[in-house]
Amino acid sequence: MADLRFDNRVAVITGAGRGLGRAYAELLAARGAKVVVNDLGGSLQGHGSDAGPAQEAVDAIRASGGEAVANTDSVATEAGGKAIIQSALDHYGRIDIVIHNAGNVRRGLLKDLSYDDFNAVLDVHLRGAFHVVRPAFPHMVAANYGRIVLTSSVSGIYGNQTVANYATSKTGMIGLCNVAALEGAAHNVRCNVIAPGAVTRMAEGLDTSQYPPMGPELVAPVVGYLAHESCAVTGEILSSMAGRVSKIYIAETRGVYQPTWTIEQVGEQMTRIDDRSSPWVFPPVPSGQMDHILRSFEMARKGAGAAD
Ligand code: NAI
């Protein structure tokens, strides 16, 4: 199979000065994309700024014969997000790909977490996604082309200690992705979520000794596929870590139908409600939500043994 290329495609990658984002930027640029390397360059907690990381990534790309420009606006504000997308339009005249990857971390138990720390993480991850997707989306719709990749996390989706802000953001990314996939479907705009894992500064302190090598370059091809014209999926969540690629689904059990319920009956029926041996319901995305709800309802009404 010939190499999949990104010639004439323009990509914005947030947080691309370090870690995973830099690996994505280097791979896409090596395959012909023009890349806006966005990175505010602050600390892991999101304090301060430093133009160094974005510029170093751009220098490395150019040294390898690629095309890239640095951008140091913060994705945490509406104005910053607009400026990041505008940078692509100013330098390259179009926007084909948005990979929202920037991230910060502020840990704290839920009983202690401050509003400042909650908002600082939502601003970069979750609102940050909206801050770049919102200004890019009309251009993609008008061009009848777009590829969007949002970044989630298994510790966000499945939960972890001390990351209420992060988990809220990373799960919220899934809802935004589903709507972007749905609204983009008729315009050849596809949106997917990556749940990556790699040894970067964000993973410092984690014990990865039981895993095979976990470099960001193992995740980059998965994001590259999701960002490519040939990407055949939309509204999906792919997990990629240490060489393993899998799909994460949100699914429902078939459910139990009764025309009326009491509190007691909910408790009594919990085993059947949670019957994981029955056919799972995987809401197709993009889909009309009501279609899926009605189908699920019919499955529950048909009862045990019924397939979709
Ligand atoms: P990293 O800390 O190496 O890179 C994140 C980059 O985002 C940094 O260079 C930082 O300067 C930049 N950034 C932070 N705030 C910004 C802002 N307001 N505007 C623009 N840039 C900003 O971290 P890593 O590991 O490469 O993380 C990338 C993404 O992958 C994040 O969204 C993270 O939550 C996610 N992720 C990473 C995992 C891992 O194992 N490394 C696991 C799960 C998710």
Image (cartoon, rainbow, N blue to C red):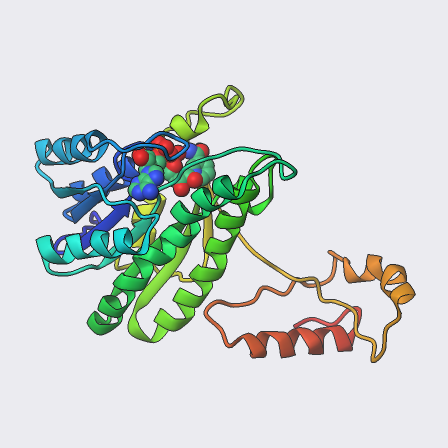
Residue 71: x percent and y percent?
A: 19, 43
Residue 68: x percent and y percent?
A: 13, 43
Picture quadrant of residue 8: bottom left
| Residue in view at x 85 percent, y 64 percent | 266
| Residue in view at x 35 percent, y 44 percent | 101
Whether residue 243 can be seen here:
no
Residue 94: x percent and y percent?
A: 15, 61
Whether residue 256 can be seen here:
yes
Residue 221: x percent and y percent?
A: 32, 42
- Whether 124 is drawn above or below 243: the answer is below
**What number of labels is visible?**
0
Picture quadrant of residue 44: top left
Report the front residue among 89 and 50. 50
Q: Is residue 292 left or right of residue 215?
A: right
Report the front residue among 187 and 233. 187
| Residue in view at x 39 percent, y 65 percent | 180
Q: Is residue 100 left or right of residue 302?
A: left
Q: Quadrant of ligand 1?
A: top left
| Residue in view at x 23 percent, y 41 percent | 25
Report the front residue among 137 and 108. 108
* Image quadrant containing the C terminus: bottom right
